[in-house]
Structure formats: structure tokens, C-alpha cells
Image (cartoon, helix red, strand yellow):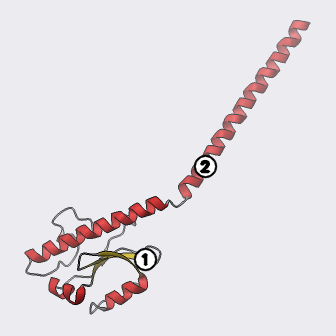
Amino acid sequence: MRGSTSNTMREKIGKFKRWTMLAASFLVIFALGIATGFYISYPHPVQNYMEGLATIYSLKIVGLDLENYARKHDGRLPATLKESRTTIAPEIDPSSGKEFVYTGSGRTWNEMTKDGGVVLAYSSDRSGNRYALFSTGAVNCISDADLAEELKKITGLRPPQ
């Protein structure tokens, strides 16, 4: 009798250990899932900073391509950013995936660089701030209100909505 009691006791302990391990594994997987969810949804300052740098770099390349295009075409600027491609200049904002807004269509380089320079292109909306490429070659992060003021310098352009 004694041997059969210990076998059933061992079976019960074995089942208990298996269920405990299974429950512990489930809790670990659940905790990792929750932690991953928090990690993914948290806005990373470093990631935002790097996206901003990528946009600035892209706008600088666009500016160089526009200047090269104007030199080769008697000072005229291209109708679209795609026409100005002399390198692999991106006309798409890497941080938003949207095309840069181009303001130089049908204008000349001299017209755009007079009076200290005006906005040649700018990024799509970034929570009230945008990166703007000026004809001086500078790329600045400016508010929508400041961008509207800068666009008033270019005749025939309305500020972004």
C-alpha cells in the first residue's frame, strides 16, 4: 500500500510542477508582451532627432541639386523637384514619407536668392513645425506661422493650410 500512495503523491507533485512551470512561462511571456508594447508605443527622442537630421540632410541635397540645375539651365529653376535630380536627391521627406513642398516652380535662381533668400522647399507638417530649405542653403526648423510669413515674400504663393 505504501508504494502506491507514494506513486500517486509523486504524480500529483509532478502535475503540480508542470502546471506551475506552465503558469510561470505564461506570466513571463505576458510580461514581455506588455513591456514590448510600452517600448514600441513610447516616442523615442533619439528616433525623432535622427528623423529630423535625415530631413535636414535631404533638404540640403535638394538645395544643391536645385542650384546645380539652375546653373545648367540659365538660372531657371525646374518645374518639379524630380526634374532637378542630378544626384539621387530625395524629393520625399524621410521622416513623414510625404513629398517636400517645392516653391521655386517657374522662377529663376536670382529671383529666389534676392533679399537674403526665400523658402525653396519645406517638409510636410510636423506637429506645428517644419523644416524649410532657404535659397541661401540654410535649413531651419520653423513654426507654421513663421513659414507663412516667409512664403508671403514669394509672390503668388499662399501659406500652407
In this rendering, is residue 85 above or below 104? above
Q: Is residue 83 visible?
A: no
Asked which quadrant contains residue 5, the reply is top right
Name the image quarter holding the C terminus.
bottom left
Name the image quarter holding the N terminus.
top right
SS for callout 1: strand
Mark 1: few/some/many CA within 10 Å (<14, 14-19, 20+): some
Residue 98 place in picture, x, y as percent = 36, 69
Q: Are marks 2 and 1 in contact (CB under 8 Å)?
A: no
On residue 102, the disc is none
Q: In this view, which residue lies farthest toward the right?
A: 1
Residue 108 place in picture, x, y as percent = 15, 85
Front-most of 78 and 128? 128
SS for callout 2: helix
The residue located at (34%, 67%) in the rendering is 55
Residue that carries the numbered disc 1 in the rendered image: 129
In this rendering, is residue 56 above or below 120? above
CA–CA distance between discs 2 and 1? 31 Å
The residue located at (28%, 70%) in the rendering is 59
Task: Tell me the amino acid under the disc marked 2.
Answer: Ala
Q: Is residue 80 visible?
A: yes
In this rendering, is residue 101 above or below 92? below
The residue located at (27%, 82%) in the rendering is 103
Asked which quadrant contains residue 97, the reply is bottom left
Asked which quadrant contains residue 66, the reply is bottom left
Residue that carries the numbered disc 2 in the rendered image: 35
Front-most of 22 and 139? 139
Residue 57 place in picture, x, y as percent = 29, 65
The residue located at (17%, 77%) in the rendering is 78
Point out the tag, 2 or 1, that comes first from the N-terminus: 2
Q: In this image, 51 relative to 2: left or right?
A: left
